[in-house]
Image (spheres, rainbow, N blue to C red):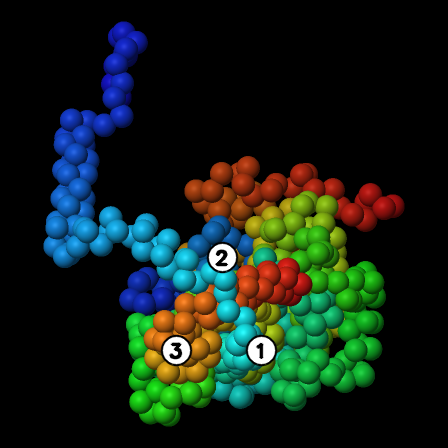
Amino acid sequence: MVSMDTTPEEWVRYTPRERLQRFVIFLATALAIVWALTSINVIWAWVFDAPQQMGDLFGRMVPPDVSNLPKILWVLVETVNIATIATAIAVFVSLPVAYIAAQNTTPNAFTLWLGRFILVSSRSVNTIIWALLFVAIFGPGIVAGIVAIMFRSIGFIGKLLGEAIEEIDKRPVEALEATGASRFKVIVYAIVPQVMPTFWAVAILRWDINLRESTVLGLVGAGGIGLILQSAIDTFNWQEAATVLLSILVLVVLGEIVSAWMRKRII
Amino acid sequence: MLKISQLVKRYGNGAPVLKGLDLEVPGDSVVAIIGASGAGKSTLLRCINRLVEPSSGTIELNGLMLTDLKGAGLRAARRRIGMIFQGFNLVDRLTVMENVQSGRLGYLPTWRAVMRRYPKEDIRRAYELMERVGIAHYANKRADELSGGERQRVGVVRALMQEPEILLADEPTASLDPKTSEQIMELLRALSREFSLPVLINIHNVAEAKLYTDRIVGMRYGRIIFDAAPAALDQAAMDEIYAGVPAEERGEMGNVTPLRAKNA
């Protein structure tokens, strides 16, 4: 204990050593940013030119050309379907993956490793990269898009679900094991009810994300609205591109509303 | 008749938690196991239904050698052993009826369990037992909507649904208020008589143990150092069982008024 002969009048939050440390960390961060900025080759003329270019593009986009609207809307429906089908399949496939990737349910070390491997490989590859791959395999079109989104979603849903399984209350599991229930029945009665809220929340969230991801799949030829957007841009048909962008915006907002509503209803 | 002989349990390479323990529980007696935290009470109970794997020794229940069993045989044997927990261990998001019926999981075909298509006689038995302990009107409520005492009653009914040959209760009243805790002890004793069921209760509250049980087993450091009728548990025996534990933590006699005395 420090003896308190007189009441101290000075108090500092950091010791000089700590202050020096903090200053060095700040300096290093600032240097990293400066270095990053100098390393990339920015053509500053184009940056300063941007407002004028934006005005020019905007002028070419207005008014949006709606003559192709029925087709755009139909492809938009197709886009929603890609997202929905891919999410539905991914949800089912990710269930066993989550089960073997969770430490407390996986049968053995090999299955744990396998589960983790599936999750990591699915998550480390972006949807667009998956799409490029599957366009090469299935040819351009909607199937490649569905499979690409599904592959990316398995990792996402599987990881979050696996974590939910690892965080369950183990006591009911112990209680049901004590009744002589088989492993499967213990899963159905003690584990499934506990991860159900997470399951629905994750499935809805992923559907929401997939909706947005499916709008860009067309850029690599994997079906959906992106296909029309790209052909409009390629042919400098900026008025139609504007219509497509606006309809994507509406779709995403609608998706947001629907998923918020589902979240409230189900959870 | 439960017969435990030379039971040893050690976790890893450490010192054994149970050191060659012998215990016999005949008939429908209610037996309290007391002892300081870490004495091995919980481990002892969990060795009986093999939630914890004994290192050596044998446990025999009505002629069945529990320590030899594996897989399906072990699960079939566990159906005969009901267990009640300190934290109730219910599935919060399931209804009371589903929690109660989960006591039948060892008997049900899988599809019935998954679809919740419980047999008529199981449903009748569930209602009878819930009526008996006073929770029948909660059948459709979610388990987490109930109070502590009610939840423990669900736990008791779940165990009884197994049609067990013995009940193990691991600190069944430690999470409950004093009044509710007495009610649960009273209930366990009454059920033991009604179903001619031996009941093994781990308990910290020595006053309750003395009031509601027929026999007290005192454990210390993995050994049984006291085994007699409650009346024989005197201060000297208490001091030996709880050597090093202050008296205030034991819940001395006098803190609890017997329910019957109040009702009379």
| Amino acid type, residue under disc 2 in the picture | Met
Q: Could you tell me residue B263's position as x and y percent?
A: 85, 46
* Circle 1 chain: A
Q: Quadrant of the N terminus of chain A?
A: top left
| Amino acid type, residue under disc 1 in the picture | Pro
Q: Is residue B163 above or below residue B263?
A: below
Helix, strand or loop status at disc 2: strand
Q: Quadrant of the C terminus of chain A?
A: bottom right
| Amino acid type, residue under disc 3 in the picture | Ser
Residue at 37% x, 60% y: name it: A57
Residue at 59% x, 57% y: name it: B87
Quadrant of the rendered image containing residue A20: top left
Dot 3: within a 10 Å radius of its alpha carbon, few (fewer than 14), some, or many (20 or more) residues?
Answer: some
Helix, strand or loop status at disc 1: helix
The residue wearing badge 3 is: A231
Q: Could you tell me residue B89's position as x and y percent?
A: 59, 63
Residue at 32% x, 62% y: name it: B15
User: Which-is-in-front pick, marks 2 and 3?
Assistant: 3
Dot 2: within a 10 Å radius of its alpha carbon, few (fewer than 14), some, or many (20 or more) residues?
Answer: many
Residue sitting nearer the eye, B175 or A121: A121
Give the Cα distance between marks 1 and 2.
81 Å
Dot 1: within a 10 Å radius of its alpha carbon, few (fewer than 14), some, or many (20 or more) residues?
Answer: few
Q: Is residue A240 above or below residue B78?
A: above
* Relative to B264, A241 lies left or right: left
The residue wearing badge 2 is: B219
Q: Which mark is residue A70?
A: 1
Quadrant of the rendered image containing residue A99: bottom left
Q: Residue furthest top?
A: A6
1 and 2 marks on the same chain = no
Residue at 35% x, 86% y: name it: A134
Circle nearer the N terminus (3, 1): 1
Q: Which mark is residue A59?
A: none
